[in-house]
Image: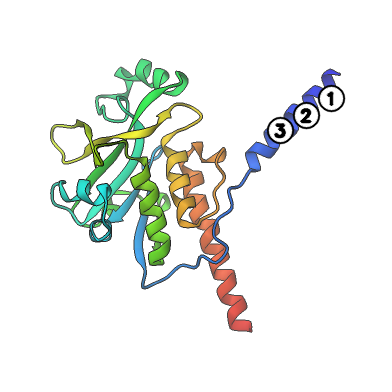
Amino acid sequence: MRAVFAAGLLGLIAALWTWTLPGDPGLREDMAGVPVLVLDNGFHTDLALPRGALEARPGPLADAVRALGPGDWILTGWGDAVFYVDQSPIERRLPDGARAFFRPGNPSVLMLDPFAGDPSFRIPPARRRALRLPPAAFERLAAHVEATLELTDGRARVRAARGGDDARFYAAQGHFWILNLCNTWAARTLNAAGLQVRPLRSVVSPEVLASVDRFRRADAQLDRAARRD
């Protein structure tokens, strides 16, 4: 009986490890489309989104972006309402990090951080990816970001700000903990645009980049097949 239970548990773990959320099979990269940057700082994933494209669509996300300081790109990420905002040395924050990871029910925030220039330059090439999404795919991505906001009277609510930078942290939907992390949020956002993602593996930031790599390889294969035809 123990052997059967162990085999079943291993099978469940393997199934979850390879579990893939399907994307849009018709999604193709559009070189004339909307640029999206996927940035990995080593443990956390931000999505850099063009300000103009966000402001062009109506709704509370566009209103929040218009209220930010100057910058052509908006760094967008999700995380714990305390640990994510705090930038003090990590060794001082380890107890709070344990709380954020292992205590269910932690409130969350959506970060919107305006950035002047190209934000990819501050990230090594191996930890950044660039996409060009068709307008419809970008709209789905932006709608997912907007749906993350916890609205009050139809408007986003600033929960925290940091001295010394223009980032704003808005009250957000969802609870942060080990089964629902910043990187899994980024993966789900890309999935909303149409990319396949592996939710369990996406607890780590390199897997979010890997989802972009898989999409681009599939896109290149479709291009080669079209040329052969």
Q: Which residue is mark 3?
A: 12
Q: Give the CA distance from mark 3 to mark 1.
A: 12 Å
Q: Relative to 111, is 147 on the left or the right?
A: right
Left/right placement of residue 26 relative to residue 128 reads right
- Which numbered marker is on residue 8? 2
Left of 194 or right of it: where is 153? left
Which residue is pictured at 80% across the width and 23% down the height? 5
At which x and y percent is residue 88?
A: 24, 25
Q: Secondary structure at mark 1?
A: helix
The foreground one among 172 and 214 is 172
Question: Which three-letter amino acid code belongs to the residue tagged 1?
Answer: Val
| Residue at 24 percent of width and 37 percent of height | 153
The spot of residue 12 in percent (x, y) is: 71, 33
In this rendering, would 187 be left or right of 225? left
Residue 130 shows in this picture: no
Give the residue at the far front of this rendering: 153
Contact, CB < 8 Å: mark 2 with mark 3? yes
Distance between mark 2 and mark 3 Cα atoms: 6 Å
Q: Are marks 3 and 1 in contact (CB under 8 Å)?
A: no
Question: Where is residue 99, by image quadrant?
Answer: top left
Q: Residue at x 54, y 60 (%)?
A: 24
